[in-house]
């Protein structure tokens, strides 16, 4: 510590120095609380921006999947109508087209996987935020309960702090409810995408035409069977045989059967 010498006697030759401490320089003031609050607000804004981006990315990936599904389904619809109406379209050509649409389905699975991964990461961010806010709810609730208990004991309290907590806690609880709802929505999207992936053909097939054609086949052949129900069972069995033999989906096997029946009826 720096020292200074004070002369106590006028006689400089006999004077003995007396050592006294010099006052230390003042310590720099600590960073104000406002700076800490500002840093916390900046961090929170960054988290919100990151969360908003994750939501936008996941939703965009989901919309892309839906667009690809619709594109394949439209191609299936056009192909089925073309195969049904164009007598020159052979089964060999049909199989080549079906292979193309199957390749598109394989590509679609990659888009689905990407969307699932984006929603999974989004769910993690939402759950992290939920846990953080949940902790704040409990902390502030304890603070409020403490103030109220002190107040009931007749001790002085900060009324403004109490009112602030009474406004803050319901707001945080509402935010928790919204986050919980969003997390459930995201998990629902993940399950939906997984089902799409597991049943990729069902998700992209077109059945509007074939259902009508199947009814026409039943109506045409029901006189050969005991009842329309029996006819439907037998025709489904025949469709399954054609599908396995030719290596084509049941929808196209149904159309193929109808084309053959129409040809027989014309010949007959």
Image (cartoon, helix red, strand yellow):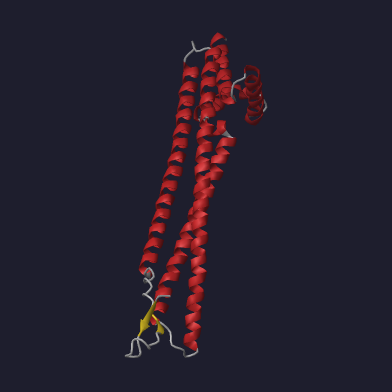
Res 57 quadrant in image: top left
Q: Quadrant of the C terminus?
A: top right
Name of the residue lying farthest toward the top:
267
Q: Using the image as rendered, state which of residue 70 and residue 241 is in the foreground.
A: 70
Residue 22 seen by the camera: no
Q: Residue at x 59, y 25 (%)?
A: 250
Q: Residue at x 45, y 70 (%)?
A: 169
Q: Using the image as rendered, state which of residue 156 and residue 78 is in the foreground.
A: 156
Q: Quadrant of the N terminus?
A: bottom left
Q: Residue at x 51, y 24 (%)?
A: 101
Where residue 163 sits in the image (x, y, percent)? Answer: 40, 77
Residue 113 seen by the camera: yes
Name of the residue lying farthest toward the left:
10
As drawn, 141 above or below 195: below
Q: Is residue 234 left or right of residue 38?
A: right
How many marks are shown on the rendered structure? 0
Q: Residue at x 47, y 36 (%)?
A: 65
Where residue 43 sits in the image (x, y, percent)? Answer: 41, 57
Where residue 242 sits in the image (x, y, percent)? Answer: 63, 19
């Amino acid at each position: 510590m720096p020292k200074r010498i004070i002369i106590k006697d006028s006689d400089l030759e006999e004077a003995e120095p007396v050592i006294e401490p010099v006052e230390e320089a003042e310590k720099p003031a600590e960073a104000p609380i406002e700076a800490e609050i500002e840093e916390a607000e900046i961090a929170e804004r960054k988290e919100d921006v990151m969360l908003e981006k994750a939501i936008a990315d996941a939703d965009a990936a989901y919309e892309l999947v839906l667009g690809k599904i619709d594109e394949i389904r439209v191609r299936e619809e056009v192909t089925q109508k073309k195969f049904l109406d164009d007598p020159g379209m052979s089964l060999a050509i049909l199989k080549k087209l079906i292979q193309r649409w199957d390749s598109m389905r394989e590509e679609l699975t990659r888009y689905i996987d990407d969307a699932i991964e984006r929603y999974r990461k989004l769910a993690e961010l939402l759950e992290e935020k939920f846990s953080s806010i949940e902790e704040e709810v409990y902390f502030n609730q304890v603070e409020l309960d403490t103030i109220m208990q002190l107040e009931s004991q007749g001790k002085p309290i900060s009324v403004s702090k109490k009112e602030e907590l009474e406004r803050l806690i319901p707001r945080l609880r509402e935010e928790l409810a919204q986050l919980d709802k969003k997390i459930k929505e995201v998990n629902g999207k993940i399950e939906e995408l997984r089902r799409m992936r597991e049943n990729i053909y069902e998700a992209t097939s077109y059945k509007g035409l074939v259902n009508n054609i199947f009814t026409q086949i039943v109506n045409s052949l029901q006189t050969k069977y005991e009842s329309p129900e029996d006819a439907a069972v037998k025709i489904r069995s025949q469709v399954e045989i054609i599908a396995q033999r030719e290596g084509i989906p049941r929808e196209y096997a149904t159309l193929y059967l109808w084309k053959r029946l129409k040809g027989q009826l014309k010949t007959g």
